[in-house]
Every structure is written in C-alpha cells, then in structure tokens.
Amino acid sequence: MFSFLARVILIVIAITVIRSIFSWVQRFLTSAQHSPPAAQTRTPPQAPQSTALEQDPVCGTYVSVDTSLKRIVKGKVYHFCSEACKDRFTA
C-alpha cells in the first residue's frame, strides 16, 4: 500500500515539474517573439498631463479635461465623453 502511495505522489510531483517547465518555455518563447528591440522600448519623457476632471452634463461620466470633447455655450465650456452625449446636449 505504501509503495502505491509513494508512486502516486512521485507521479504527481513529476507532472507538476513537467508542467512548470513547459509553462516557463512557453513564456520565454512568447516574450522573445513579442519584445521590441531595446531602442524602441524607451519612451521619451512627456510633459505631465492634467488630471483635472469634469462631469459630462448628459450622462454624468467624469472625463479628463485634456481628452474631452468641448462645447462652448453662452461663454461656459462643457466637456463631453462622446459625440453622442455632445449631440444629445445640443439637441
């Protein structure tokens, strides 16, 4: 009985080790195929973007002031998350 349990445990350990090795090899091959050359991985420094948020008056979503769609009505600037919200507001 002990011999049978020892064999089962050894088989489970062997399967675990083999799966780990295959997983490591797969990760290595996948990362080697998709990694860009070292010169392209560096990104140039960028100016910090504003973190100011404004609420879309139609749907209530908060959008970044930098990336929002803007509409000026009677001197007030409104910020929209999409063209659909912008069109709904002006209709």
Image: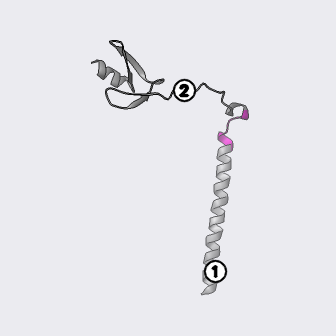
Labelled pair 2, 1 in contact (Cβ < 8 Å): no
Depth check, front residue: 3 or 79? 79
| Sequence-earlier tag: 2 or 1 | 1
Which residue in the structure is indicated by mark 1? 6
Please tell me how crowded label 1 is: few (under 14), some (14-19), or many (20+) other residues with Cα within 10 Å: few
Is 82 above or below relative to 24? above
Distance (Cα) linking label 2 and label 1? 61 Å
Helix, strand or loop status at disc 1? helix
- The label on residue 87 is none
Choose top left, top right, bottom left or bottom right for residue 7.
Answer: bottom right
Q: Is residue 33 magenta?
A: yes
Front: mark 2 or 1: 2
Q: Residue at x 43, y 24 (%)?
A: 68
Q: Residue furthest right?
A: 38
In which quadrant of the rendered image does the N terminus lie? bottom right
Magenta highlight range: 32-38
Choose top left, top right, bottom left or bottom right for residue 31.
Answer: top right
Q: Is residue 78 magenta?
A: no
Q: Residue furthest top?
A: 74
The disc labelled 2 sits on which kind of residue? Answer: Gln
In which quadrant of the rendered image does the C terminus lie? top left
The disc labelled 1 sits on which kind of residue? Answer: Ala
Is 75 above or below relative to 54? above
Q: Residue at x 42, y 29 (%)?
A: 63
Please tell me how crowded label 2 is: few (under 14), some (14-19), or many (20+) other residues with Cα within 10 Å: few
Q: Residue at x 54, y 26 (%)?
A: 49
Which residue in the structure is indicated by mark 2? 49
> Total label count?
2
